[in-house]
Amino acid sequence: MVNTQPTQIELGDDIVAIDVHTHVLASVNDPQDSEEHAQHNEAMQKYFGRDFKNPTVHDLAAIYREQKMMCVVFSVDSSWATGEPNAVSNDEVLELAAQYPKTIIPFSGVDPHGGMRTAKEIRRLAARGTRGFKFHPSSQAFYPNDRSVYPILEAIEETGTVALFHSGHTGAGAGRRGGGGIRLKFSNPMHIDDVAVDFPDLKIILAHPSFPWQDEALSVALHKPHVHIDLSGWSPKYFPPSLVQYARTLLKHKMLFGTDFPLLTPERWMKDFDTLGYDDDVKRLIYRENAARLLGLTSGE
């Protein structure tokens, strides 16, 4: 088995944080949303109580460069479930990310139902420079430990890239008729425990505080060496006590700063995080060092 490691990305000394979870929601080539994408984004804005512009890669680069941060960007491929293509293609993300190598870290969204076709696409995208792949089991309607998905996970493991899985509750579909057809059961983080056993070298991120399965997520991350947790999608003031405690102690080297931008802004997230009383060493790990190590970023020194 050949493990083709991704190319190096340099981490500048002035970078104060790496946001591992941001969404690119608008294409520079076709800024018009489909009806499905528009309904989805409207429902998300209502759920989070925040109006926002759907960002392009250019928008994300400008926002995070001003903040002296890097950010992981991606779209989600829910085409199997919705019949709609990605709002922004993976190739567009990669092409535009190349213009901002000190700010944008590109991830890709692929169809988990595509079998060997998707596995081939993963190898192509990895060769083009993607650093990882975002999955949303509830929106994409699949169990991560379903054997039909294993050729896809094998390709990610082989290429040395990262698999990022949404976990827990989701604002996607919330309030829409029938929850927009989205089933929460697919995003129980215990499904990732099987993945971490069967692909022991696969680098995994569990996205978000995993309500109502927070303890399951903590257990998997504590037990499996390559499983990390990103803290996106929730204001830190709503974090459950167990998550706050493990982020300070046993899992401080596996917690990752993330916002879910544009649903939450870095300013809002960091302001609320500062109220939790973490010392500077732990904050440096969570804001920067853990992600740099996981993503293989190199120091500019």
Image (cartoon, rainbow, N blue to C red):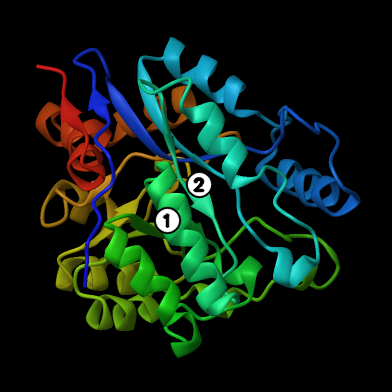
Instruction: Classify residue 283 as left or right of residue 23.
Output: left
Residue at horizontal 70 percent and vertical 38 percent from the top? 49
Given residues 108 and 123, the one toward you in this image is 123
On screen, residue 36 above or below 258: below
**Image location (x, y in percent) of residue 58:** 59, 21
Residue at horizontal 51 percent and vertical 50 percent from the top? 108
**Image location (x, y in percent) of residue 73:** 50, 38
Tell me the kind of residue under disc 2: Gly
**Image location (x, y in percent) of residue 183:** 65, 76
**Image location (x, y in percent) of residue 269:** 43, 32
Asked whether residue 52 is in view, the answer is yes
Tell me the kind of residue under disc 1: Ala
Mark 1 or mark 2: name the one nearer the start of the chain: 1
Asked whether residue 263 is in view, the answer is no
Between marks 1 and 2, how big is the CA–CA gap? 8 Å
Tell me the SS state at disc 2: loop
Q: Nearer the viewer, mark 1 or mark 2?
A: 1
Do residues under tags 1 and 2 come within 8 Å of each other at their CB atoms?
A: yes
- Give neighbour class at mark 1: few <14, some 14-19, many 20+ (Cα, 10 Å): many
Tell me the SS state at disc 1: strand
In the picture of the structure, the residue carrying the numbered disc 1 is 207
On screen, residue 200 above or below 233: below
